Amino acid sequence: MIPANSTAVLSVQGLCKTYGQTVAVNDVSFAVNRGEIVGLVGPNGAGKTTTINMILGVLEPTAGAIRIAGVDLAKRPSEALSNTNFAAVYAPLPGNLTVEQNLRVFGMIYGVKALGARIEAVLDEFDLLRFRRQKCGVLSSGEQTRVGLAKAMLNNPQLLLLDEPTASIDPSSARDIRARIRNFAAERQGAVLWTSHNMYEVTEVCHRVLFLAQGRILLQGEPDALIREHGAATLEDLFVSVAQQSLEAEA
């Protein structure tokens, strides 16, 4: 459970994104509190990555407001995004640079103070000291994922956005990544928005889950509570049921 006095690190209100007549995200509102991991789940095309990209400032919302650590993203984007970072297995770091070179480049982009010391700290935290001079392109998928997370922690973000962070990596590496993210939320009181198709992972890691379909949030709540309330055997069964109902409604 999240402490009652938690404050929202991420606040999304009435978020919409349209492309001509196509509605990708439709009036989405939610918050992610300090120390909380929230799962954003839904079928392909539900609007998850579009939502993430709007929070990252990559896409401009058609309507709605996003506040990060109390800062309006539309009015003060640099300040808002200085409190944010992102990792995804489909967005690996440049493979021709070494681990240390990548961290130094991104640390300079983020304006990290005492960068050398901070690089040493994340190399140690993510068990990457022995890989510091290896090019990222020759690392295993699990090792590249750890480097991506080390990059995402460089600026000590208050908000961490994870888009399918454990896709395509082995179960042992995935377990390690989940533990590290739980520690980030619990020990540093960071807020995490986590998209995944792995319902076992969502059940294990996330304090709350948001079911997104056709650009709208259809269900939200604690994973175990949602399973009980809807009479499902597992979160995966509930996911399939919600996705199917959404498809039938669309038809």
Image (cartoon, rainbow, N blue to C red):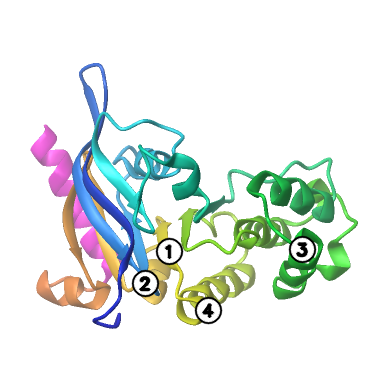
Which quadrant would the N terminus be assigned to in this image? Answer: bottom left
Please tell me which of labels 2 and 4 falls first in the chain.
2
Asked if residue 206 lies left or right of residue 190, the reply is left
What amino acid is found at the position of numbered circle 1 in the picture?
Answer: Val
Please tell me which of labels 3 and 4 falls first in the chain.
3
Residue that badge 3 annotates: 119
What amino acid is found at the position of numbered circle 3 in the picture?
Answer: Ile
Residue that badge 4 annotates: 183
What amino acid is found at the position of numbered circle 2 in the picture?
Answer: Glu
What amino acid is found at the position of numbered circle 4 in the picture?
Answer: Asn
Q: Residue at x 85, y 63 (%)?
A: 131
Q: Are marks 2 and 1 in contact (CB under 8 Å)?
A: yes
Instruction: Tell which of 78 and 217 is nearer to you.
Output: 78
Where does the image place residue 21, in percent across and percent down from the top left? 20, 18
Please tell me which of labels 3 and 1 falls first in the chain.
3
Where does the image place residue 74, in percent across and percent down from the top left? 35, 37
Where does the image place residue 48, in percent across and percent down from the top left? 35, 45
How far apart are labels 2 and 1 at the CA level?
6 Å
Q: Residue at x 52, y 74 (%)?
A: 184
Q: Which segment is the magenta one? A: 234-251
**Residue 36: mark in rendering:** 2
Look at the picture and state if 228 lies above or below 115. Answer: below
Secondary-structure class at tag 3: helix
How far apart are labels 2 and 4 at the CA level?
11 Å
